[in-house]
Image: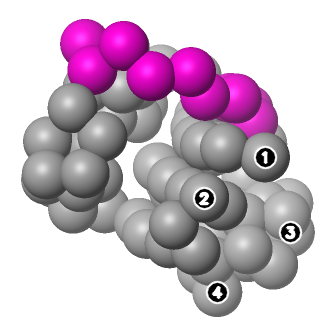
Amino acid sequence: MGLTLYELDGCPYCEKAADALDDAGVDYETVWVDAMHSERNEVKRVSGQRGVPVLVDDDHAVTMAESENILDYVERTLA
C-alpha cells in the first residue's frame, strides 16, 4: 500500500511533511482531513489522535505524528 499522509489544507506543519516527501521523490497518497478535530475519525482510527500531519508507512509498519518526527523519518528511511 505504501505511504499515506493525512493533512489539513493550509496547515504549515502538513506542508513541511508533504514537501519532505516530495523532495525525497517518494510516492504517497494524501488524505485531506476535516478542519474540525471532532470530525477526524479516520486519523484517530489510524493514529490514536486527531492532530495532523500523520504519516502511515504500510511497508515498514510505521505510523507517526508530528511534523519534526516525519521529517526525521523521511530523511533517515525514505531519502
Mark 2 lies on a secondary structure that is loop
Q: Label 3 amino acid? A: Asn
- Quote the CA–CA distance across marks 3 and 1: 20 Å
> Residue at label 2?
59
**Residue 21 visible within the image:** yes
Crowding at dot 4, Cα within 10 Å, few <14 / some 14-19 / many 20+, comes out as few
- Quote the CA–CA distance across marks 4 and 3: 9 Å
1 or 2: tag closer to the N-terminus = 1
Mark 4 lies on a secondary structure that is loop
1 or 4: tag closer to the N-terminus = 1
- Quote the CA–CA distance across marks 1 and 4: 20 Å
- Quote the CA–CA distance across marks 2 and 4: 19 Å
Magenta span of residues? 23-33
Q: Label 4 amino acid? A: Gly
Residue 71 drawn at (x, y percent): 19, 45
Crowding at dot 2, Cα within 10 Å, few <14 / some 14-19 / many 20+, comes out as few
* 30 part of magenta stretch: yes
4 or 3: tag closer to the N-terminus = 3
Q: Quadrant of residue 42?
A: bottom right
**Residue at left 86%, top 69%?**
41
2 or 4: tag closer to the N-terminus = 4
Residue 36 drawn at (x, y percent): 73, 52
Q: Is residue 73 above or below residue 46?
A: above
3 or 1: tag closer to the N-terminus = 1
